[in-house]
Image (tube, grey):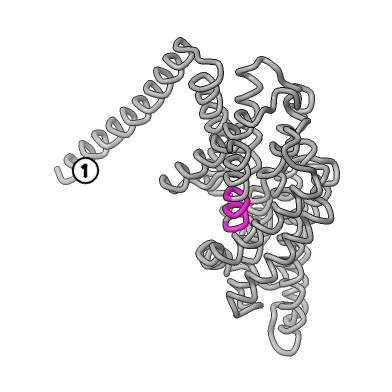
């Protein structure tokens, strides 16, 4: 019974992965009208993600399944806790409107279990966290350089801006870039849902990847429309060539990371790429403090939130420890209270300032 529950939760998680990060891969082509049909855009995403997972998802599955904590810890109950911890954190984040990375949330949930059992492969974990920082920075630098080149080229040759007969070919290039990004998402992110099952020997790696890829594709087709609309509207200010630079850079970097078994946050890689292009296009003003804060918040909140949830679930249901639960509840209460208090103080200061402004 528990095995079926674990499988259902994993496949539901895979559908949500397809609906969120994977569907966003086609945002640039859809937003720039390189591909006008939403259904066609989602179909291309689904096929690309499926192929990415089936052809190259094995190494990341191995890392998620046995590279962060010893696989002998992974019982059916622990797998359910890892998946529920990650999925529940994503659900809460969606309610609050905070975008989280599925890769970071899954790794955080696994680390929470490792901390509870005091058994972690810290070396591998340090490498993963390091690349969470390194790859977005590399994405920014590459797209910045490409952005400078594209800006000069578009000034010199106006047809590169997507006007006239070249619009069709530049549109096709952008769609290919979106497919590459979706391929890389399938390669990297399907492991988040399937890896714990494979690590616990509940399903073989090949069957797990096939099922995960299938449900990720279903999620993209059935639930990805809203994400596609939102993401497309956010990046319509990019030209066809600039959008291609972002997609090809992000997709290539995530594919390289996947080959080495590193779970990487595609959303942050893509966001950093957009920032790189934007900085080359509009200058340092693109690097607004609010955008940087948002990236840092996602980077910090994603793994820490799921770590706390999975650690709490372990102490509630597996290693029942009232003291640890009390400490966690008190810490969360203190953190939330501090945030709320700081908001009240800011509002009071703002009200005082507004009241005095007319004197």
Give the answer, above or below, for where 53 lies relative to 298: below
Q: Considering the image in quadrants, where does the C terminus appear?
A: top left
Would you say residue 145 is visible in this rendering? no
Above or below residue 252? Residue 30 is below
Q: Quick one: which residue is furthest to the top in this view? A: 323
Q: Please check the rendered image and state whether residue 14 is part of the magenta-colored stretch, yes or no.
A: yes
- Residue at 17% in and 41% down: 355
- Measured from the top left, where is residue 113 in percent x and y? 62, 24
Asked which quadrant contains residue 143, the reply is: bottom right
Looking at the rendered image, the quarter that the N terminus falls into is top right
Foreground of the two, 184 or 279: 184
Which residue is found at the position 64% from the left and 72% from the top? 41
Q: Residue at 69% x, 36% y: name it.
A: 196
Along the line of sight, the residue nearer the viewer: 285 or 142: 142
- Outermost residue on the bottom side: it is 165
Q: Which residue is mark 1?
A: 354
| Residue 42 visible | yes
Bounds of the magenta segment:
12-19
In the rendered image, residue 53 lying in the magenta stretch gets the answer no
> Picture coordinates of residue 27 (x, y %)?
61, 66
Within 10 Å of disc 1 (Cα), the crowding (few <14, some 14-19, many 20+) is few
Return the x and y of residue 121 as percentages of the image width and height: 76, 22
x 46%, y 19%: residue: 328
Prevailing secondary structure class for the magenta stretch in the rendered image: helix
Looking at this view, name the residue that lies furthest to the left.
Answer: 359
Residue closer to the observer: 294 or 298: 298
Displayed quadrant of residue 244: bottom right
Q: Is residue 193 left or right of residue 71?
A: left
Q: Position of residue 292 (x, y in %)?
A: 56, 43
Residue 62 sits above or below residue 315 on the image: below
In-image side of 138 versus 325 (left or right) = right
Q: Secondary structure at mark 1?
A: helix
């Amino acid at each position: 019974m528990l095995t079926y529950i674990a499988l259902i939760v994993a496949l539901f998680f895979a559908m949500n992965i397809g609906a969120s990060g994977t569907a966003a891969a086609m945002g640039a082509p859809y937003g720039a009208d390189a591909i006008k049909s939403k259904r066609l855009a989602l179909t291309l995403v689904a096929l690309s993600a499926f192929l990415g997972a089936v052809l190259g998802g094995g190494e990341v599955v191995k890392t998620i399944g046995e590279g962060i904590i010893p696989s002998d810890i992974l019982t059916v109950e622990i797998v359910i806790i890892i998946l529920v911890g990650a999925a529940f954190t994503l659900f809460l984040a969606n309610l609050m409107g905070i975008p989280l990375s599925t890769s970071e949330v899954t790794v955080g949930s696994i680390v929470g279990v490792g901390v509870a059992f005091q058994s972690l492969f810290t070396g591998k974990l340090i490498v993963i966290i390091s690349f969470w920082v390194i790859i977005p920075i590399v994405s920014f630098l590459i797209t910045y350089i490409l952005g400078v080149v594209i800006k000069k080229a578009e000034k010199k040759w106006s047809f590169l801006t997507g006007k006239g007969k070249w619009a069709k070919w530049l549109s096709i290039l952008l769609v290919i870039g979106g497919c590459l990004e979706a391929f890389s998402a399938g390669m990297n992110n399907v492991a988040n849902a399937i890896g714990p099952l494979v690590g616990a020997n509940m399903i073989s790696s090949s069957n797990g990847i096939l099922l995960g890829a299938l449900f990720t594709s279903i999620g993209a087709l059935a639930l990805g429309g809203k994400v596609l609309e939102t993401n497309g509207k956010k990046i319509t200010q990019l030209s066809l060539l600039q959008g291609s630079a972002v997609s090809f850079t992000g997709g290539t970097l995530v594919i390289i990371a996947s080959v080495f078994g590193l779970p990487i946050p595609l959303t942050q890689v893509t966001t950093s790429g957009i920032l790189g292009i934007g900085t080359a296009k509009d200058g340092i003003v693109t690097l607004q403090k609010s955008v940087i804060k948002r990236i840092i918040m996602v980077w910090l909140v994603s793994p820490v939130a799921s770590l706390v949830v999975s650690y709490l679930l372990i102490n509630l249901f597996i290693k029942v420890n009232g003291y640890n639960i009390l400490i966690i509840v008190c810490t969360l209460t203190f953190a939330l209270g501090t945030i709320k208090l700081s908001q009240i103080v800011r509002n009071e200061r703002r009200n005082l300032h507004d009241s005095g402004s007319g004197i």
